[in-house]
Amino acid sequence: MKKVILTFGLIAGAISASLMMVTTIFADRIGFDRGVVVGYATIVLSSLVIFFGVRSYRDNVSDGTVTFGRAFLVGLGIAVISCICYVVVWEVVYYNFMPDFMDKYAAYQVTKLKASGADVVTVQKQLDGIARMKVLYANPLYNAAMTFLEPFPVTLLVTLGSAVILRRSKPRVPQSV
């Protein structure tokens, strides 16, 4: 079980990390609005590896059968490893290649808020919130925790779906009379 989890977790992590690096290269062209869509699309794409990992476990390790619980645990292990890879790469990218990310995001949020016709008080509240967020994101542990929470819900949903779809109980052997 550990070998399947590690192998497929690292494959999913490599896919999500690679796609993240590619999208960060084009971050200015993609923009923040489309960046969310592109980012989550890459997370969903890399999460599909969870399905194949659970299926591999069922077919190759568990003799063609797997309970929902065991399938869920295998998928969860793959998901956690994938998310950890995602976090590690984001930490490297954020602190070394995109140290101005929060400044650009703040400017984007303020521009969007002003374009919506928000009053000065609302804009100032948003600026205060962004200032607090910048302080929090400067802490690598907070940054890592928030980054982990970005792909984890998606991977958890894929894990649940995979466990439901791939569960298979042992065939019943007819009793002879």
Image: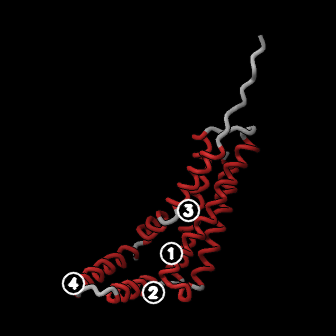
Q: Nearer the viewer, residue 85 or 51?
A: 51
Q: Which residue is mark 2?
A: 100
Residue 121 is marked as 4
Foreground label between 3 and 4: 4
Is there a contact, CB below 8 Å, between mark 3 and mark 1? no
Which quadrant of the view contains residue 143? bottom left
* Mark 1 nearby-residue class (10 Å; few <14, some 14–19, many ≥20): few
Distance from disc 1 to disc 2, alpha carbons, whole Å, reads 18 Å
Image position of 107 (left or right of 48): left
Percent of width and height locating residue 93: 55, 78
If you read the primary sequence from the N terminus, does the residue marked by circle 2 or circle 3 appear first?
3
If you read the primary sequence from the N terminus, does the residue marked by circle 1 or circle 4 appear first?
1
Q: Which residue is mark 1?
A: 36
Count the marks: 4
If you read the primary sequence from the N terminus, does the residue marked by circle 3 or circle 4 appear first?
3
Q: Quick one: quadrant of the C terminus?
A: top right
Distance from disc 1 to disc 4, alpha carbons, whole Å, reads 27 Å
The amino acid type of the residue labelled 3 equals Cys
The amino acid type of the residue labelled 1 equals Val
Distance from disc 3 to disc 4, alpha carbons, whole Å, reads 38 Å
- In the picture as drawn, the residue positioned furthest to the right comes out as 176
